[in-house]
Every structure is written in C-alpha cells, then in structure tokens.
Amino acid sequence: MAIGNIYGNGTTTATAGANTIVHYYDKAGVKAANEINVYAQWADRKEMPLNMGKTFKISKFLHIYDRLTTDGAFAAKGYLTSRDIANVTSGLSAAVLAEGAGAVNKQTIKKVTISTAFARYGEMVDYTDDVTMFSEDVLQVRYREELGRLGNRRSEDLIQLDMLATTNVMYAGTASSLLTVGTGVAANGSTDSAFRVSYDLIRKASRKLVRNRAEKNTEIVTGSTKIDTKTINKAFYAIIGPEVKYDLESLVRNTGQYSEEIAYVPAYKYAGATNLAEGEVGAMQDVRFIESESAVVYTGQGAAIPGSYVGTLSNNGTNFDVFPILFPTKGSFATVGLKGYNKIMFNAESPETISLTNPYGTNGFFSYSMWYAGIILQEEKLLKVLVAASA
C-alpha cells in the first residue's frame, strides 16, 4: 500500500513540496554580498555576452576641436579653458576659405579603443559533520553571510584599486609624484599643514574637473527654516579615508583681513531635505565627501622623513604615508558583468554527499565565486589627489 505523505528527499517529489530553507540561506549570503557599496555606487554598469572571450572593448571618438589629453597643455588647462586668444585667432584664420577653394583645411577624426579583461575570484570554507550535529549556532546562514561579506569586500577593493590606477593625479604641497609627497617638510612640524588636505587644494581639484568636462554628481541643497544649517552647492563627490576626514574637519578659510570661518560642513548641517550618498559625511566648496573605512593608504611611499622630525604627519618611521582622495565623477568608470551570470554565485556540498574524496560523509564546504572586470572610461574625469595626513 502506497504511503500518502512522503519526504521525497526534500525535492519537488515531496508531498509538501521542495525544501525552501536553502534558498533562505542563499538569500542571506546575497544580501551580505551587497552590504557595502561605497565604491560600487559610482561605477557605471556594462555587460558583455557569454562566449565572446574574456576581453571587453569599448570605443569613443575624440572631438576635433578639443586639446588632446596627451598634449602638455591639457594637464594644466583641460579641453578648452584658458585658451590663448592669439592661438584661437590663428586657428580661425586657418579655417578661412578663399574664393574657389578646393580640398583644403582637412581634419582627421580620432577614435580611441580601450579594453579590460575578466578575472575570476572565489574563496571557500569547509567543515565537518560534527559542526552541523552539535553546534548551537545556525551555521548554514553564518557561513554564507561571512562568505558574502568577504566577496563584497573583495569587490569593493577591486573597484577601489582600479579607480586609483588613474593617471589623472594632483598632489599636496610642491609634490610632483607619490615619492615626493612631504618633500621639504620642516623638521619641527611647522609646515605640516602645507602637505595635508586644504581648502585651496580642493578648490583646485574642482577647477581641474570642470576644465576636463566632468559632470557634477549633485544639485544645490537649498532652503531650510532650521537654525545653523548651510546651503550646499552643486557638487562632485570625493571618497576619503578617516585620516583625511580628521584633517578636513578643522579646515578654515579666510573671509577677510582678520576673519576666518570653518570651511567644512558636516552632513547633519545640510539645509533642506536631500538624499545622502552611502557613507556621505560632509561638504566643502564644490565637493561632498564620502568616508570609506576601507580606503587604502600608500604606507611609507612618500618622501623620506627629515632627521629629528617632531611633526604630526603619519609615517612608517622612515617615509611619510600618503593618502588618496578619489573623485569618481559621472561616466568615468564602469564595471563589466557577464550577461545572464549573477554578480556572485554560492556553492555548497553537504557532508552527507559520499564521494571518493569524502568516503565517510564527514566533510562539507561552502564557497563563492564571481567574475570581475573594471574599466576607466574617461580618465580625465577620474581624479586622484594625494596628500599627507595627521597621525
């Protein structure tokens, strides 16, 4: 006589339907894998179909009238700003057509192709059947959550490092490279402020982005009846670490011969209602700042510390530490996904599964894997500013 209600190994053949708790476990892992998006929130999304190789390519045309990004003048003046009137006049003269002109004043269209390659990342944990038999914790969820958070951190780090690979760089003080950040600092610490983030340095960064046609991320924040609130200008976003934020909070700007005011505005003082970006902590001039706990440091990669140095700049004992301020403006960077393939995949094998490598049914594992590719789309609009910071 047939049994009316069967477990059916927990599959769709079960009278009560398939088990769903595994899907709940995976959902916990996927949620953890998207927990933090400080860097990912600024990346555009591109897709590439499967079976098209591992290299993603994208092309763009350059405007004929613009300065080329390889020209020496571009680094200082951007595409069209600060043009010498004599050069503009000369250019117009060269475009004049004489009566009966033939094939003259020819121009060449330039196209640039950039590419990136996919790489696969993954990590795992394994465990014995004793864990599931005797542990008082719900480890099915915990393992997936921990792997999801680990995958999330790996993804954020990959995006951060790819963004920091930009060659569009500015420096604090008189530095001209990573190795010269801190060069010339006074041994008594009296000139430390010249090498940290400053109000004028942020203004110069904004000017450079405008010259390079970078688009601001936000609109003006106006209107409030609350006391001690501030209007915030249309702004770029910049990602900073806690060390740079510490220096930002004490910056002042001169407003007259004998007057100074705090330049940095914490996010809780924004006037009116506005949506804050993930991690947003404040604003200054035309920039709104996002604090990243995971912002990297170029430890000991700055200038050599002068003998008998008693200042407060962070260092590793021999050289100054260098801290990046990253401006990821609209359309400057993208991550590339494989069409039809999830951002992150979770895999699991129960200890009950008998195999040649698990003959006694005592070992199980959980793992995640993901494909990643990042690409700088418009390098001139992705700016990195390198500064020293207070210890």
Image (cartoon, grey):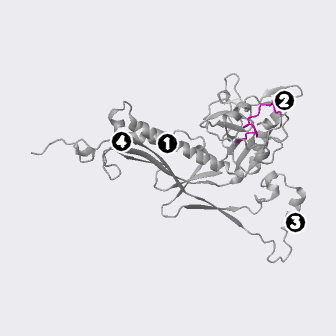
Q: Of residues 350 and 260, which is closer to you in this image?
A: 350
Residue 244 percent across, percent down from the top left:
71, 35
**Which residue is drawn at the image coordinates 85% and 40% (left, top)?**
184
**Which residue is drawn at the image coordinates 84% and 43% (left, top)?**
174
Q: Is residue 136 left or right of residue 163?
A: left
Residue bearing the label numbered 2: 255
Which sits earlier in the primary sequence, circle 3 or circle 2? 3
How many other residues sit within 10 Å of disc 1, few (<14), some (14-19) or many (≥20)?
many
Q: Is there any visible trace of residue 331 in the rendered image?
A: no
Which sits earlier in the primary sequence, circle 4 or circle 2? 4
Q: Secondary structure at mark 4?
A: helix
Question: Marks 4 and 2, how far apart in space?
Answer: 62 Å
Residue 188 percent across, percent down from the top left:
85, 31
How many other residues sit within 10 Å of disc 3, few (<14), some (14-19) or many (≥20)?
few
Kind of residue at disc 2: Thr
Residue bearing the label numbered 1: 33
Question: Marks 3 and 4, how far apart in space?
Answer: 73 Å
Q: Secondary structure at mark 3?
A: helix
Q: Is there any visible trace of residue 196 in the rendered image?
A: yes
Q: Secondary structure at mark 1?
A: helix
Question: Marks 3 and 1, how far apart in space?
Answer: 59 Å
Residue bearing the label numbered 3: 93
Residue bearing the label numbered 4: 22
> Where are the magenta residues, as a range?
308-324
Which sits earlier in the primary sequence, circle 1 or circle 4? 4
Question: Marks 2 and 1, how far apart in space?
Answer: 47 Å
Q: Of residues 213 and 295, which is closer to you in this image?
A: 295
